[in-house]
Amino acid sequence: MKYKLKQKKNQRIERITEATLVVGADIAKKTHVARAIDYRGIELGRDCWFHNDREGLTKLATWMKELQRVHHKTDIVLGIEPTGHYWFPLAQFLQEVGVKVVIVNPHHVNKSKELEDNSPTKNDYKDAKVIADLVRNGHYSEPKLPEQVYADLRILMNLREKVMDALGQAQRRVQNWLDRFFPEYTEVFRAWDGAASLIALREFPTPEEIVSLGSQCIAQRWKKDIKRAVGVKRAAKLVAAAKISIGLRQGLVAARVELKTLLEQYDMYVRQEKDIMGQVAERLESIPGTTEMLTIPG
């Protein structure tokens, strides 16, 4: 393993030759800065400050091409620190104009700052040079920006992860509500997101309402929407738990509003996750071998 890593690093170092213009760019939200060096670390030309728009990216490309011409370089390698998401449009633009983009580890940038000016302080101008030096010494990797259906899949799966995080938060908030207003509820329903439980939470969530309705009315309500009817026994157990509940009895009007809002959020995230996975399934159909891969458990 160590030999393979050493071999890969040597290949990256060999990639930077006397004919290579090495550029380091510090990426921000609106304004970036780039500095250029040769394979020995000698800085070439002045720095380039450019905005995060087409005019700015064109300015960067023109600046690099001019340095390439003046210093007789045959290729350009631009290194960036992949913090945040602002570098994606930059990488796409430069790849389209024939500039190779590589990334450096942010940890390496932080550790190398002091070598530049004997100071650990951070600034955009300094970081651009540090990044260029890391690239020159082979401390970089090549990003794989997905294309076509694979780009869609990456976006969809990243979106699903965010939706699932939000769904988990909504679930925890509902549980928090139950802990405050009906802590005995989980003794009747182990999972509050089952069909019968959701009906109860939406229509008669508080112990007071459950006792008022009685087990027969609750069981009949469940039978309207659930084919596999939840029996009177479960309804009776729910009523019994409600009678001895230690849940809060003040602020119940607002509590119902709170729970209604939380359940609407829960429903939305469940629907969004389902829609996203439907989109994923459609795109997987166009990739050879996915049908067979999906037969593997997990």
Image (tube, grey):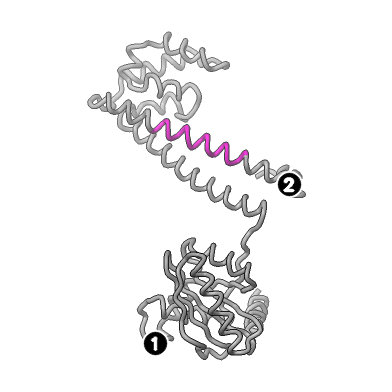
Tell me which residue sits at (65%, 45%) in the image. 298
**Mark 2 secondary-structure assignment:** loop
Q: Please tell me in which quadrant of the rendered image residue 89 appears.
A: bottom right
Label 2: which residue? 286
Residue 253 place in picture, x, y as percent = 27, 24
Tell me which residue sits at (66%, 77%) in the image. 8
Q: Which residue lies furthest to the top in this view?
A: 216
**Mark 1 secondary-structure assignment:** helix
Task: Report the predominant secondary structure element of the magenta stretch.
Answer: helix
Please give the range of residues in magenta. 262-278
Alpha-carbon span between mark 2 and mark 1: 53 Å
> Is 269 included in the stretch rendered in magenta?
yes
Question: What amino acid type is highlighted by mark number 1?
Answer: Asp
Residue 172 place in picture, x, y as percent = 40, 39
Is the Cβ of the residue at disc 2 closer than 8 Å to that at disc 1? no
Label 1: which residue? 117
Category of crowding for the residue at label 1, using alpha-carbon neighbours closer than 10 angstroms: few (below 14), some (14–19), many (at least 20): few
